[in-house]
Image (cartoon, rainbow, N blue to C red):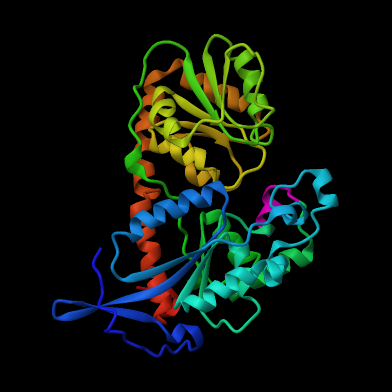
Amino acid sequence: MLGYDPHILCSFRSPLGGIAAETVYCARLGRGYMMRTKISFVLQEALGWKTFRGQLSAVLETRDDIEPQFISPSPLGWRRAFLKRAYMRPHEKIYRQIDPIVALQGGLGAKIRAELDAFGPSAAYFGGHWLAGAINQGPQKIPFAVATDHTRASMRVSLSTTGWSDADLAREARLFRDASHVFPMSDWTAASLRKDCGVDSANITVMYPSIDISRFVRPAYQDEGKLRLVFIGNNFLRKGGDKLCQWVGGPLAGKAELHVISGDPDARGDLPGVIFHGRVPNDKLVKDVLPSMDALCLPTKSDMSPLAIIEAAAAGLPVVASRIGAIPELVLEGETGFVVNAEDEAGFIAALENLAVEPELRRSMGLRAWDHARSRFDASVNFNALIDQLIALGQGRPHGKT
C-alpha cells in the first residue's frame, strides 16, 4: 500500500461543514497528490458482519484513496436481553421492550460518538443500520450511510413479524430518511425503503451480500447415487430443518441423503437418511462440505437474504428455497434452482425429486448458479463500488455519485 508524507497535510473546506470539513489527507505520488478520504465503518459484532469486515479490510488494503477507521459498538452484555430484534419468540416480546435505535441514542452509543469525534471522518458507514442511532444526538454533522437487509415494515408485512410497534417503524423510517445514502441488500428491501420509509430513490443503491468468490471450487457433479442435500442454518426450526428431515425420511427415502450443518440444539437425533454435523467452521464448509454436495435446501419460514444460499451458489450448487424475503433475487427460478411457497410441502418435495432423478438438471443449474454468484456477489467488485460511493459522499458529491 502506498504511503503518504505526513508533512503534506491538506485541508479542504467541505460544503457539508462540521467534521466533514476535515476531509482528506494527501499523499505525494510522483508529480501529484493522492487524496485519502477519512471514512468510519461502524460494524456490529455479529458473525455475518465480522465476515463483512474481513472482506472489506482485504479490499481496503488495495486502495490508496481512503483512510478507514473501524468502530465496534459497546458490548451489549446483559442489556442484549432487553433489546428488540428482528426475530423474537412470543415469550421474548415480554421483556424485549427497548428499540435498539433508542438505546444507541443514549448511553449505548457513547463509545461510537466518542470515537467518531476523535477520528473526525468525512463520512460514516453503519452496518447494521440501527447503529446509526448513535449519531442522532450530539454535535456530529457528518454525512452517513447505512446498510440493511430489511426494514421493519417489510418484516411486518412480508414475513408476518409483529414485534415492532408503529412508533418503532416510524423511528426507523426517520433514520433511513436522515441517512445520506442507504445500501439495501436486495430490491425487496429497496422497494420497502421507498414505499414504507419515504426514502428518495436517488439515495438508494442495492448492494447484494458479498463473499470472497475465490475461496470456492466447483463440486464434483455425480450422475449416480442418492441426491446429496445440505441444510445450513443455526435457527433449525425457523429455517425449516425439521420439515426437511421429515421429507428425507419419508417421501424422499432412498432418493436423498441430508447433511445438516447447524449449531442449534434442536439439530440432532437419529433419523433415517440424515447426518447431523453440528457447527462446522466456514473454511471446512467451503473447502470440504459444499464441494461434496449436490444441492442446498432451505425451506425457511422467515428470512431475508440468507448467506447460505449465496455460498451454495458460489460453490456451484442448485438451491431449493422458500419464496420469502429477498430469496427470489438470490435463486433464479428454473435457472439456478427452485423457489417454492414456504407452506407448500408438496412443491418442495417435487422440486427435490426432480433434482434427485435428473443429474443433468442439477449440473446445469449448478453451473448457472456458479456464473450468477460471480456476476452478483463478488466481494472485490461490490466493496470497491461501495468505497467509491463513500469517498464521493465524504467529498460532498450529491448522493455519493462517483
Q: Residue at x 32, y 42 (%)?
A: 214
Image vertical order of residue 8 relative to residue 352, above or below: below
Find residue 39 and report its image quarter: bottom left
Find residue 82 and report its image quarter: bottom right
The mark tally for this picture is 0
**x, y percentage for residue 175?**
63, 71
**x, y percentage for residue 160?**
73, 48
- The front one of 28 and 213 is 28
Relative placement, left or right, of 119 versus 83 is left
Residue 185 falls within the magenta-colored stretch: no
Q: Residue at x 60, y 76 (%)?
A: 178
Q: Which residues are magenta?
A: 153-161
Q: Main secondary structure of the magenta part?
A: helix
Q: Residue at x 58, y 74 (%)?
A: 114
Q: Residue at x 43, y 23 (%)?
A: 294
The furthest residue to the right: 94
Residue 160 falls within the magenta-colored stretch: yes
Q: Is residue 115 visible?
A: yes
Q: Quadrant of the N terminus?
A: bottom left
**x, y percentage for residue 228?**
47, 19
The furthest residue to the front: 7
**x, y percentage for residue 271?**
64, 14
Relative placement, left or right, of 104 versus 28 is right
- The front one of 307 and 401 is 307
Q: Is residue 198 visible?
A: no
Find residue 154 and report its image quarter: bottom right
Relative placement, left or right, of 229 versus 368 is right
- The front one of 160 and 378 is 378
Image vertical order of residue 257 relative to residue 211, above or below: above
Image vertical order of residue 293 relative to residue 392, above or below: above
